[in-house]
Image (cartoon, rainbow, N blue to C red):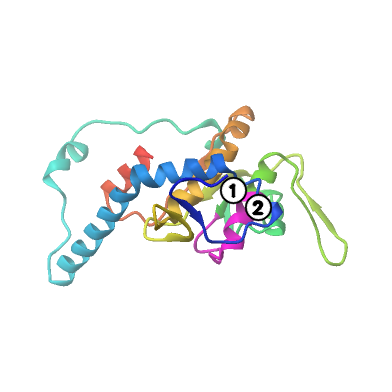
Amino acid sequence: MPLSGVEVRGAIPPEFAGILTPEALAFVASLERAFGERRQALLQKRDARQAAIDAGEMPTFLPANSEARQGTWQVASTPAGLQKRWVEITGPTDRKMLINALNSGADIFMADFEDANSPSWANMVEGQINLRDAIRGTIVYTSPDGKKYQLNPQTATLLVRPRGWHLVEKHLLVDGQPMSGSLFDFGLYFFHNVHALLDKGYGPYFYLAKLESHEEARLWNDV
């Protein structure tokens, strides 16, 4: 069913249909419409800040944030699923790598949609398929030589790293414009997996990289 203002410019083979459902696409489009303009404005602030630094301005603290530096406060407690983080590893979201990483014995595996992952349309959507199957314990892979890979009973806790605020997903247009790669990665993962993760006593845990200001962090908080 076509969605108003949403255009998929990448291929949708049958195996992608379970991820790129009308409901999931409507959800990520709603994120783009709610937060896309703020993201663009913050990227413009990045450029202006860099120009000021290039012109000789020195980094400093914002007077408006003095209370955060001088006041007494405490961060929220660590979720139960992230209490032990002695050994963390990271890697791409391809099927074999994901199975091996979750079986590695590490405490945490960070599935990386940016630096460890070539951002082709197929890689981004297949990565979502692989994460969905891993969370449900159904992920398997058979190599060309016939070796079968599947999850152990005990696996690493899963973190997901969406792409940074500066990147777009050019294969999905919302109201004629490429949507945020961050919101695409985050939105599809959250939409398909939040309930399954909560049912297992975990949460949708994210590693949010390449933030350049407190306002960019606040944008993620609002998302």
Q: Position of residue 123 (x, y in %)?
A: 60, 61
According to the picture, the residue beneath numbered tag 2 turns out to be: 16
Q: Position of residue 69 (x, y in %)?
A: 20, 40
Q: Position of residue 149 (x, y in %)?
A: 80, 54
To which quarter of the image does residue 120 belong? bottom right
Viewed as shown, does residue 199 lie left or right of 141? left
Q: Is residue 85 visible?
A: no
What residue occupies the far right of the structure in this picture?
146
What residue occupies the far bottom of the structure in this picture?
55
Q: CA distance from mark 1 to mark 2?
A: 6 Å
Q: Considering depth in this image, is 155 or 172 the residue closer to the camera?
A: 172
Q: Eyeballing the image, is 27 above or below 15?
A: above
Q: How many marks?
A: 2
Are there few (<14), some (14-19), or many (20+) residues within 10 Å of tag 1? some
Viewed as shown, does residue 107 lie left or right of 6? right
According to the picture, the residue beneath numbered tag 1 turns out to be: 20
Instruction: State if disc 2 and disc 1 touch (CB < 8 Å).
Output: yes
Numbered badge on residue 1: none
Viewed as shown, does residue 146 lie left or right of 91? right
Are there few (<14), some (14-19), or many (20+) residues within 10 Å of tag 2? some
Q: Position of residue 63 (x, y in %)?
A: 11, 45
To which quarter of the image does residue 132 belong? top right
Residue type beneath disc 1 = Leu
Residue type beneath disc 2 = Phe
Disc 1 is placed on an element classified as loop
Q: Is residue 20 visible?
A: yes
Disc 2 is placed on an element classified as helix
At 66% from the left edge and 41% from the top edge, which residue is drawn? 135
At 71% from the left edge and 55% from the top edge, which residue is drawn? 100
Magenta residues (range): 112-129
Is residue 151 one of those drawn in magenta? no
Q: Eyeballing the image, is 129 above or below 53?
A: above
